[in-house]
Image: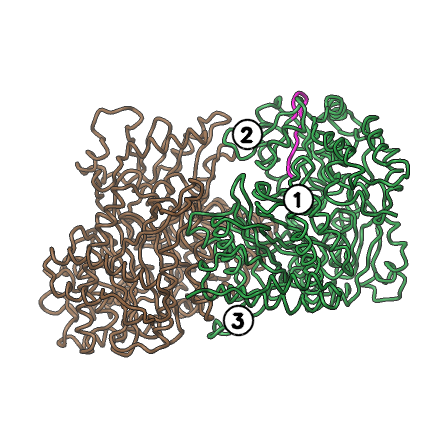
Chain colours: A brown, B green
Amino acid sequence: MQTTSVHGPQYEHLWSRILGGSFLYCNILAFKAMHCGIRKFTVAKVWKTINVCPLLSQATLSLLREIKGPTGICSIKGKRNQNLRGKLQKAGRNMSPKITTELLRQLRQVMKTSKYVTEPIQAYIVPSGDAHQSENIAPCDCRRAFISGFDGSAGTAIITEQKAAMWTDGRYFLQAAQQMDSNWTLMKMGLKDTPTQEDWLVSVLPEGSKVGVDPFIIPADQWKRMSKALKSAGHVLVPVKENLIDAIWVDRPQRPCKPLMTLDLSYTGIGWKEKIAALRAKMVERKVLWFVVTALDEVAWLLNLRGSDVEYNPVFFAYAVIGTDTIRLFISGDRMADPSTREHLLLDSALEAEFKIQVVPYESVLTELQAICVGLSPKEKVWLSDKASYALTEAVPKAHRYLTPYTPICIAKAVKNTVEAEGMRRAHIKDAVALCELFNWLEKEVMKGSVTEISAADKAEEFRSQQNGFVDLSFATISSTGPNGAIIHYKPVPETNRALSGNEIYLLDSGAQYKDGTTDVTRTMHFGTPSAYEKECFTYVLKGHIAVSAAIFPNGTKGHLLDSFARSALWDCGLDYLHGTGHGVGCFLNVHEGPCGISYKTFADEPLEAGMIISDEPGYYEDESFGIRIENVVLVVPAKTKYNFCNRGSLTFEPLTLVPIQTKMISVPLLTQKECDWVNDYHRKCREVIGAELKSQGRHEALQWLIRETEPITKMH
Amino acid sequence: MQTTSVHGPQYEHLWSRILGGSFLYCNILAFKAMHCGIRKFTVAKVWKTINVCPLLSQATLSLLREIKGPTGICSIKGKRNQNLRGKLQKAGRNMSPKITTELLRQLRQVMKTSKYVTEPIQAYIVPSGDAHQSENIAPCDCRRAFISGFDGSAGTAIITEQKAAMWTDGRYFLQAAQQMDSNWTLMKMGLKDTPTQEDWLVSVLPEGSKVGVDPFIIPADQWKRMSKALKSAGHVLVPVKENLIDAIWVDRPQRPCKPLMTLDLSYTGIGWKEKIAALRAKMVERKVLWFVVTALDEVAWLLNLRGSDVEYNPVFFAYAVIGTDTIRLFISGDRMADPSTREHLLLDSALEAEFKIQVVPYESVLTELQAICVGLSPKEKVWLSDKASYALTEAVPKAHRYLTPYTPICIAKAVKNTVEAEGMRRAHIKDAVALCELFNWLEKEVMKGSVTEISAADKAEEFRSQQNGFVDLSFATISSTGPNGAIIHYKPVPETNRALSGNEIYLLDSGAQYKDGTTDVTRTMHFGTPSAYEKECFTYVLKGHIAVSAAIFPNGTKGHLLDSFARSALWDCGLDYLHGTGHGVGCFLNVHEGPCGISYKTFADEPLEAGMIISDEPGYYEDESFGIRIENVVLVVPAKTKYNFCNRGSLTFEPLTLVPIQTKMISVPLLTQKECDWVNDYHRKCREVIGAELKSQGRHEALQWLIRETEPITKMH
């Protein structure tokens, strides 16, 4: 049974081609989610599904059969399959646009079909995103990719009777142009002459038009803006109940409905009853009667459940509506049949009425919420995130709405309790073990010329999957060498895959989901001799990393106030990086979570609190040359200061990530003595904590590597 | 002719008492503005006005007659008047609340009088502020102070049929409680149990109430919030055309209408026609047909005119409405009679039609704007600040409104051209001369025990007024010693006045309006031997000051990203300060101006640009002990860096303020070598530039002081 041979980022692009290039996350993991309904899988099983997949052309099917070979075991590794790999890579390179003429004809048909719309609509908006405003979405929600062919992570399609236009940002101009056919006009956001969606609509619509959108997919604030603009030009934005893409998407994948995983107190620290009681206390404080949980990670956190409906994010499709003495969980029914889930949620136990969970079908959330609102007395309020869908927001009459940018669940979830923090610590120790193994392996293999970005990423996953409690990666691995490192959101695919060498900087940004916690770490290294300029840049980035990590700041400080600390050393020399410095990290949940972070762009972040966990990841990117990033996940902890802010108290960070920072890349004279001490203290801790774990796992070679890599550095005087 | 004897901050409180304690700015300057209509005045003239002032009680009148003395020249200085000073100070201390029973009865009467309101209103809101959202307001606009007695700078009064309530923040809890009688309930903002104005109104109003407010005084965004909250509770917010406070304020001062000052190109660098052409270019870019200038400093800047209608701010009451080929200036008429103003504005010249200024009465702005809007075609827009009054905003139908947080004038005004920057430089040189004189004088006088906070502030003004082009102070001088220094917005009054001594830290935050530019400088000093702790704190503040002043950052950086640089050294030891680090400074305009600044609170600031001028003023305040602040005004200038941000370019600051920083207060070992160098470089420049000016002004003693105070410091190794 081979479980890894078609597994890993290097096959993502291949699968994407095979499946028609029309899905947002058509790599093998998404494929599993979509077609196999299983997490552990065999190639034979996957193959079986591929054989019946209606999306595959005859050509790709026969190509696949060739790969599969007579044994029924798929393998394209090794010398034997060089030829096949070539064919596949060639197939991958011939990226041709999706032909959408027929699909658009069908869509325009349903736009005037009374089965779907009460009156014909003259335009239909297809946003990215799902009904929960998730960052990663399931294949069934990749409607914009389906209708247009463009499967970048951000983009909005608008189809009128005559035209079809796609708005996306600079990251995707090239990709969108390649993936879309001539039916589509690409609207390059951020360029001066590009009209906004509203302005464009107003310029092309006939007088008094109706513009439709799925009210579940569009967030309430976006609806408001669009509706206002259309109204002032004499048009009207209308909610179209049934999604019109779904209406024409014959072989649309099913919404994933994977089994749930229950987390006991040894992982969560707090039971779900306690969490609901705390939420209700917040509701009483704000005088609201109902709370609607719409974000998937909030439902998962609240109920101490995890799922695998969305790639990389251990969440499941559900809503929850919490009353002062009722709990409604909207979830596709059969998942509640599992005995351990039933036991976890006490579904069959006699318990206080206010903790009795009513399980309701996922699809009925709107009608149930409407029914709740019918019964409200004048001053009774319903609490929703202001990012919730228009459909759910609109279900609550204006006078009863209580909207906040961050929900109390989002804020509570961000502050990890001691059990969660311990879990995160354990996860990071295991993750460091995997990376020590990887880096030790790379040092030996790279000089042989046999390691590529893809195989390195693969190897990282292999080492991680050997660790206890490993569940999945936490995001698509960024494995990049040389010029590829300068592409901040790079993901290696066969066409761009480079061999690691002794002449280029290598950047690896990767992470995993363990049952104890979520990791996210970036290390940048050189396997030969870095240039003075590369070392100089690396050292500035390191100084920035240390400036944030060692910062002391009063309680109540918002993360965005620390962003410039990470840039100061770079700025002094006229260098900068165009991304934020840190994001919140979930505990066995989304690797990106609110409400805190460190960014020059984020203004609405909540103050940092002890127990919050964020990343610290400054970088520097030299176009067409190299990329540098040094990322640790850090825990916000109380600090000791001489004067303690008049007892207001203060905070600092404790690194959870304990992976050596390559000292070969450091230009030591550029460091202050304090910074030198920080590096040596950090490496001492890596050696102690990870060394002990490597020893107990019997990984002696990696241990030797760790000891070598954590030798103290010395500043000459 | 004595023009200074009742002039200066030390008499402010006295005048305030004399005039009934009911004005926001009842110091002598406001008094001049209100009653004398003149800027240069004699005591005899002032006295004449006082004698007929209906607000004075017989007791204060006879006290004043005593001060005046037989000569008709007012003088309370010197030994001879010690007794009188005592009496006046005693009168000042007996701060008694204003009795408002009769006023409230009258107000409630007009709230149901059909002459003023179409239907009776059940509540009336009296905000602070004027129709231009000015920070400083004229006496005639101090309506909230008139009705309540509370004259702090921030507060909103709401009067219902039964109740009267005042919302103000922590700075003013004590003062408001002292100044208001028992008719009033004090609503302490920021405390947990204090209801918002909306919630309070909803809790006290009978069903279906009407709440009135002057639509000229309430900004559009505040109207919107209040109106929404009232509506959702079944009430309605109504605009009341005539201000109801004015209706009962029998002896309300006239709106100031002082002569204007014209500024030629040698001060402004750009003529008003060019400024209007540039504004019109922005209007074309944004596709708007009309621009409404509502902020007083924007009108003044646009037309290269200055006034003295509001204390400390060289502005005048006016609006302007700029069309694509028309200019309307709304201003009280007689000011346009002045020949130099007529010439400056080319009122009698033959010139291009689009630069012909139509002078229209100040009061007709609303009706003119309404008339303009009647003639608008569907897509034609009118541009307003989103902080403009509800009255003007509402005059523009929603579909025609174009609102932005910062107007193009605000942004253009912030970026000083070379002529303006040179003017600011000159102003700061003169200001530094005055302060060198002052500090030299203080060093000699303080140890004699004869200098108080008030007399020091007075002396500062005296030295400044000797400088060429001096017009006024730019804000009320903060002269504070010992514990008074810890009160951030302290203003010395007789009851709090302390003598300067060799045992306490002295903080002086002061500035002036010169015809060339506006200054604002804070220095903190010790005339004896500072304690180790005081030096430690001073040094952290200095490190923060330097960190901002020497910061290098890429073009496009917003000021708020630099705020933490100013705090880092303090934070490391558990110290902080609870105010922003810098504000924009006008050029012979408001000492506080948008749209840039350095603050942890400001999020909507515009990016810093070369030519902008801001203050750099970190501090530290030890309650009941001392205050430290080091403030320079700095100019944003291009920086040279090693790698120059890929030609994006970079910025840093150049200090315009050139006043020595007391090295006695520095704990040199706490400075890095770089910081030492900064101090020595700064002092070298002070010695060069200010030294030359002191020499040319023949101020030899001050020059000797400067040379002494700018001796280099040395870090021991």
Instruction: Check if mark 3's residue and mark 2's residue have beta carbons within 8 Å.
Output: no
Image side of residue A200 versus residue A295, left or right: right
- Residue kind at label 2, given as amino acid type: Pro
- Residue kind at label 1, given as amino acid type: Gly
Tell which subunit mark 2 falls on: B
In the rendered structure, does residue A409 fall within the stretch colored magenta?
no
What range of the chain is rendered magenta? B154-164
Q: Which residue is mark 1?
A: B449
Q: Secondary structure at mark 2?
A: loop
Image side of residue A591 versus residue B715, left or right: left
- Residue kind at label 3, given as amino acid type: Gly
In the rendered structure, does residue B156 fall within the stretch colored magenta?
yes
* Foreground: disc 3 or disc 1: 1
- Point out the tag, 3 or 1, that comes first from the N-terminus: 1
- Point out the tag, 2 or 1, that comes first from the N-terminus: 2
Location of residue B246 in the rendering, given as x and y in whole percent from the top left corner? 78, 33
Q: Which residue is mark 3?
A: B649
**Numbered disc total:** 3
Reply above or below: A622 against A264: below
Location of residue A578 in the rendering, given as x and y in whole percent from the top left corner? 44, 64
